Amino acid sequence: MNQLFKYNPANRNVLIDILKGVAIILVVLGHAIQFNTISSSNNLVFKFIYLFHMPLFMFLSGYLVFGTKVFDWKFISKKFKSLVIPFLSWRVVTIVLSVLVLNLNFLNLIIRTITDPSDGGLWFLLILFFNFLLLSIAAKLAPRLNNLTLLSIILFAQLLPAGILGFALVRWHIVFFIGGYLAAKYLGLIKKNKYLTVFISLALYIILISLWYLQIPSLYNPGTLIFTLLKRINDYLLAFSSIILLFFSFNYLKNKKSLTAICWLGLYTMDIYVISNFLFYLITLFKLQINYIIAFIFVLLFSIAISLLIRNFKLPKRLLLGQYK
């Protein structure tokens, strides 16, 4: 049992594990606030977390896929089994419970799953799969995956219809996914110019987070095309500057033993993400009133415990966690 809780940095990217651990903590905390606060949108911590936490996961996914030599059917099949199968498995469970407990219409829930996968809470898995799929298609058409090809992926994603299969989320998150891929591609250049990179990112972050916190009104009318464009640019810059600063901050701290527990969590981000989402669903389903700090601790610990239990059984491990090893 003790071996389960040990983190061996050998053959691991410690920095990435730390960032994944930090990201999953933020995800669980954000969901705890969302599901247990009457007006989560007015909670400053919640609003801060949602500036960058899921973009960070997409960025890390793009970063890690860099270096993949072959984007073939086997690659896509593997991603389908590890991402789409767990998405569908948990969605079936929540749909059945919603029908039995809340007496909701089964067909309507199926339709909502197709038109708006975010309704089930595990949209990240589906959107990440689509990002891998787009990258794989591009790799087939242009095997070298040069920068023009990567830009074409982003532009093509913007043409996807917004009202089905979460494509609206693909439009947003593909930028962070490709951004992570490019960061890995130009890692040497980034490290060579790390002080300039940190300075620009920090300056951008301070300016943008100040405007965000002070809620400075726009010079343009909300609803106009220029307002939408400027807000989108602002959101991207704020998320990217946050991610870059996190990278450099934890790169400096990555050898600290105090971060070992966070590194360990980074090994189980998928498990914690899907299980915690289900636990929060149960809290909502049965209308349990729990302080969000208590809910955060409870859900995080139980997610880990349930993960370790599920990993002992072959079929549940595959269907619910996408684990095939």
Image (cartoon, grey):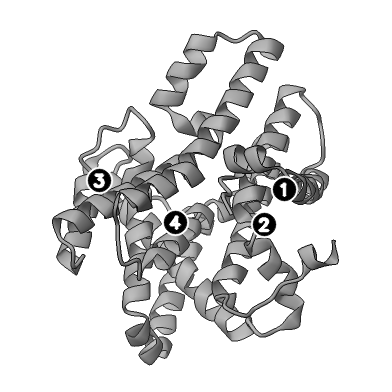
Q: Quadrant of the N terminus?
A: bottom right
Give the number of the mark in front: 2 or 1: 1
Q: In which quarter of the view is residue 42 placed?
A: top right
Mark nearer the N terminus (4 vs 1): 4
Residue appearing at x 83%, y 46% in the figure: 294
Disc 1 to disc 3, C-alpha distance? 34 Å
Residue appearing at x 55%, y 38% in the figure: 86
Q: Name the residue under label 1.
A: 307
Residue appearing at x 63%, y 83% in the figure: 253
Disc 3 to disc 4, C-alpha distance? 15 Å
Residue 60, given in percent of the width and then of the height, sits at 47, 63
User: Counting other residues with Cα less than 10 Å from the Cα at mark 2, is it few (<14), some (14-19), or many (20 or more)?
Assistant: many
Q: Are marks 1 and 3 in contact (CB under 8 Å)?
A: no
User: What secondary structure is marked by label 1?
Assistant: helix
Q: Mark 4 points at which residue?
A: 58
Residue 24, given in percent of the width and then of the height, sits at 62, 56
Q: In which quarter of the view is residue 116 placed?
A: top left
Q: Are marks 3 and 2 in contact (CB under 8 Å)?
A: no
- In the displayed structure image, the side of residue 108 where residue 47 appears, left or right: right
Disc 2 to disc 1, C-alpha distance? 15 Å
User: What secondary structure is marked by label 4?
Assistant: helix
Residue 223, given in percent of the width and then of the height, sits at 30, 37
- In the displayed structure image, the side of residue 116 where residue 321 appears, left or right: right
